[in-house]
Structure formats: structure tokens, C-alpha cells
Image (cartoon, helix red, strand yellow):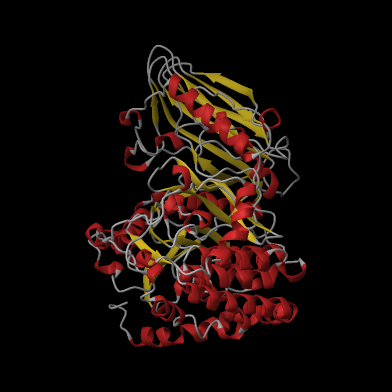
Amino acid sequence: MSTTQIQPGTEAGTATVTRLLQRQILPVGRDTDVVRLYVDPDPAQLDADKFDIGHTRAAQEANAVATRIQNATKGISAIHPDQIVSRTGFRVEAGDTVSFGTYFNAFPASYWRRHTVVDQVRLTVRLSGEGGGVIVYRSMANGRSQRVDSGTVEGASSEFSFDLPLKPFVDGGWYWYDVVSAESDVVVESAEWTAEVAEEHARQGTVTIGITTMNRQDFCAKLLGQIGDAEALQGVVDEVVVMEQGKDKVVDSEFFPAASASLGDRLRIIEQGNIGGSGGFARAQYEALKAARSDYVLMLDDDVECETEGILRAAVFGDLCRTPTIVGGHMFSIYEKTQLHSFGETVEPYSFWWGSAPGVPNGWDFGERNLRSTRWLHARVDVDYNGWFMCLIPLSVLEEIGLSLPVFIKWDDSEFGLRAKKAGFPTVSLPGAAVWHVPWTDKNDALDWQSYFHVRNRMIAALLHSDYPRGGRILRESFNHQVKHLVSMQYSTVALRHKALQDVLSGPHVLHGILGSTLPELKQMVAGSDDATIIADPADLPSVKRHKLPRKGRQATPVISGRQESLQALLQPLRQVRRPREASQTNPEVEIKAMDARWHLIGRYDSALVSMPDGTGAAFYRRDPARFRELLKETVEVHRRLLAEWDDLVEQYRTALPEITSPETWAKTFEPWMSSEAEESPETR
């Protein structure tokens, strides 16, 4: 992994080592669905500058649509699976040029420049075949590229080395290389990005991987197999700890025997009750600290596919950071594998809402537009946190600031990132490290039981970290969202959100005690509610009967102007107290698709059949004026209390934070399952 050598010209006795930062890789199994994240046969055509098209989202989306049309008309070059000759080798066919300026093979120079001790890298490319060549490029933060150096193959094979400074990458930019073939095929056998660093950075840091799983036995077993089969992770991964919290056990998966064999004694499965993702990941953090063997603990979701090379890259990056740094990966869609779903996340401080970092669009597809042609990808993206679908945390950070907040799911990763940032430990979302995951946009977590955790944990995180008086906009937004759900006849969602706010008022010391009991209580609480009852069988769906014709035939639309939205915000609450049409209680007045289910559209009707975002069924919403008045009264009261008690709650939560996130407090929560583990024999564990 690294070799020690005396660097010529250095002071006597000062040794340096060569560290491998990144190597050329190709997709495992010659997967053509993802190949464009590794190699790119198309020319670069840089998109328009934001100063030319305007800074608004509408202008940028219009430009993106125009670009897609342009790409469709020019066609896209094909890559044959046979061109992938090995995990590190690629064959460039005669007369072709292929770029490795791609997500997984370009070198993210600006991130290394900003956060690590590295100030210069060496690119070494090995080619076989006559008549080929290598061209090295760099980009600037605005996306414009420059040719840096080149080399031509002489004879049957050649090795090229290029020394490349990181000095000009303050705001952004990448290095990459293109390979050109002439009259015969050229094979890029390998390419490596290395750096000379001080001897104190010689040691390769090791990792404990923590995976929390619940009833995703095949997904989890396949992920374990990926990790176990990755030769590059030998000597890097000390242990993989699986927190089994479900009924469908990973050990019962048909894929588990092979995964277990590949990992051997590096695999440990811990069975515990369902205490959520935060409880599972906190257990992994606790076990890593207790073992004191690894330098890092890596959080991985159980329902991901992983580019295992990213684990190694994250660990090497962490080794060479100037200060202990949390290193996260990016998320691609598991359904559209070249579509980038998360490139960098921040928490907007005034509204205290998470989302993509400024300048980062949602759902960027590398299959439609490559890295070299995409201007925004070249500016370095700074983040507040990284999702725990893939996130590497130094144990030294855990020792300093504690473990996960005990909040079951939602906001545990973002709160931890904010806590670490406040303590002086940055987070970096590192390009070239990524997983494929189910996108959040395909989930229903804003309406079902998960909405409780969204609301409660966001409010707790704001109490802990917001610097604005009374949390900025958070209370006003919370109230507005409650009213929107009320006029949308989503009464169970309103009740869940109301309970979330009540539980915030109960203070921080109840969090550990309710960690395992809250979810069953929430499900029982909404059982039988119209909007929480999902009708999956189309034969059971009630027929739609419109009881009032639309005025002049004009159908309501989910897309309205800002002025119309303001008008509806005034009218809709008043409409809810009117008695609904009797026939609407047996037959929905309209059927509304999930993508069109806006509050101002749903609220126009006395009942509606509304489909769910995950596509599994629909719910029959019915207007209930008495329920509306009752829940509105409760909403006003709980927000009044939060406003009045905000400063006191801030003091309570911030004072309690070190205690409720400490390994000692978490150990008490884990105790029932640790006791049962002690009674088991090594064979059953």
C-alpha cells in the first residue's frame, strides 16, 4: 500500500513515504449500467455559465433540458463490456479516444488541496499496445479545462509519470487523463495517483464497518459479499459488525453463506431490539470504541450497493487530512445507476432544513452529461454533514463529541455533523466514494409514521444547534405545515406531528427510554385512520363520483402561481369547517396522483382518492370538520408552548447532550442485549 524511501533533497534524516491515493478502477462484473461513471467515450461540451443563463432554478433547469435535447440529437457512443479487461484495465479500440475524466477515475484535486497535507500528486499510467498516448488535463472551479501534459507510447508498452501540483485548486477543479489509440488497440493496464508524504503519515488507517439491518436480509447479505470479495480491503477492514434488528435474519439469506465465507472472522452479527438506525449505528460506534482496534468506523446502510474502492479512498483521505475529518460518500440511485442523488448536504440555518448544498442540482444524470461537460461539478462543494448511508468517522471524533443522538431515525447523521463541525471537526463528501441507494424521493416518509421522527428530531437538532432566536423560521414553518396537512385531510399525519412536538417538550432525558417503544405506539395511534389506511388491491378502491361540476369546465391544477397559492392559503382553512357533501363520504370526488398531491389541490374537495409516492396503493381521504377543529386547536397550543419555552428547552437539550450521547449512557440502553450475548456460545454468535 505504501513504501518508505528517503526523498532526495530533503533534510538529513527526514523520511517520506509514497501513499497510493487513488487508482484507476472499472466496474465489477463489467456492469454496463454504471460504466459511464468509470470511462467516457464522448467529447466534452461544457454547459452554459450561470452568469450567462441566470442564477434562478428555472433558468438552470431550462438549460439542462436544452442540453439533454442536444445530447439526444448527437447520439452517445457505446462501450462494449469486452473492453473492460480487468478491475483496473480497459481496452481502447483502434482510432478511439476515451476519457477517464469520470466520477470514479478523475482526481478531485480541490478536495485534497483544501483538507489534506498533500501538495503534489504523481499520476502514473501504464499502457500496452503500439501507437497510443496519454493526455493529462486539469479543470478550474468554473469548469473550463486546460491541457497539462502528454506522452506517446514507444514500442509495445510504456509507463508515463506526471508530477502535478495542487496549488491552483483553491476553489475547485479536477485532474484527469484521456487515452488515445492509433492504428491498433491500446490497453490501459493501470493508472495510479500517488503522493510523497511525511513518514508520520505512512500507516494505513483501518476501519470497522457498521451496518444496521432490519428485514432486508438479501440486500444486506449481498453487501457483505461485496465487502468480503474486495481484495483491496484486505488489511483495511478490521471487522464488519451487523446490528440485526429485524425478524427476517440476514443469516437466513441464501446469499449469506458465501458472504460469511469471504469475510471469515472479520464478520460479527449482533442481535438487538429495534432501536432504529441511530441505535444500530450507535452500537457500531460503541463496539469500535470498545475494541480500540480501528482508526475509523464506517456507517453503511443495509440496502445499498457499494463501490468498495470508495471505502479505501475514504480511509486514505482521512489518514492524510490535517485535522480529524469525517469523510462521507455520495449517493447514486439504485434504479437509475448513473443518476446522482446526493452530492453534498447542508442545513440551511434560518429555516433549519436539510437539503443539497448551494449550487447542487437534484438528480444529475452522468449518463446524459459527463463530468467534463458539467460546470457545477468542478466547484468544490462544502457540506455540513454526510448521510450515514456511507460515512467514515474517526474514532478520535467519537471520543471527543460522543456517539449518535438517541432519536431512532432521521436527523441523527445531520445533527452529528453539526456537532462535529462546532467542535472543529469538518465533514467532507468525497467524490469517487459512493453507494447506490433507494432515492428519498421514492419514499413516503413525509406522511406515515416516519413524519413523527422528521418533526421531532429536526426540532431537537435546532434546539441544539440553531443560533437564531427561537430557531429562526422553524416554528413558523412547523405551524404552516400542520395547517397544510389539515386542509389536505391528512389527519393522522397531523396527529403524528403533534405528538412529535409534545415529546420535544418532554425534554432530552426521555429519549433513551422511549427509543424502542415509540414506533409501535405510533403505528397503533394511526391505525384505522382514513389517510393512513392504504388500499393496495385496485378491486377494493371506491369508485370516483364528482358531486359538483367544475366551474366552466375548468379543472383544478396542482401547478398554481404564487398569488393563487396565497389566496388558497386564506380560503382553504375556512372551507374546512363547512359540512362536507354527504355522498363524498362514500365515494371520492376525485382521484389524485401522488406527484400532484399538493395541499391546495386536495383541499378543494370533500374527499379524494390519493395514491402514495411509493406506488403501492392509495388512501381514501375524507374531510372531517370536527377533527379539523380539534387538531387545529392542539396545533395552536403546542406551538404557543414551544415559542414560550424555547430558551429553556435550548438550555435543557444543550446541557444534556454530552450525557445522552456518551458511550456510558448508550451502554445502559444496550445492556439487555449485551447480557444475552454474554450467555451465547461463540458458535451461535
x and y percentages locating residue 349 in the rendered image: 70, 60
Task: Locate the C terminus by quadrant.
Answer: bottom left
Q: How many marks on residues? A: 0
Furthest residue toward top: 183
Q: Is residue 444 above or below residue 166?
A: below
Of 119 and 245, the residue lying toward us? 245
Q: In this view, does 219 lie above or below 11?
A: below
Residue 397 makes an appearance in the image: yes
Where, by quadrant of the figure, is residue 610 drawn?
bottom left
Where, by quadrant of the figure, is residue 147 drawn?
top right
Of 83 and 448, the residue lying toward us? 448
- Please indicate whether residue 41 sits to the left or right of residue 253 in the image: right
Which residue is at a point 50% across and 68% down the rendered structure image?
451
Where, by quadrant of the figure, is residue 544 drawn?
bottom left
- Please indicate whether residue 74 sits to the left or right of residue 217 in the image: right
x and y percentages locating residue 404 in the rendered image: 56, 72
x and y percentages locating residue 546 in the rendered image: 36, 54
Which residue is at a point 46% across and 64% down the rendered structure image?
447
x and y percentages locating residue 389 in the rendered image: 48, 58
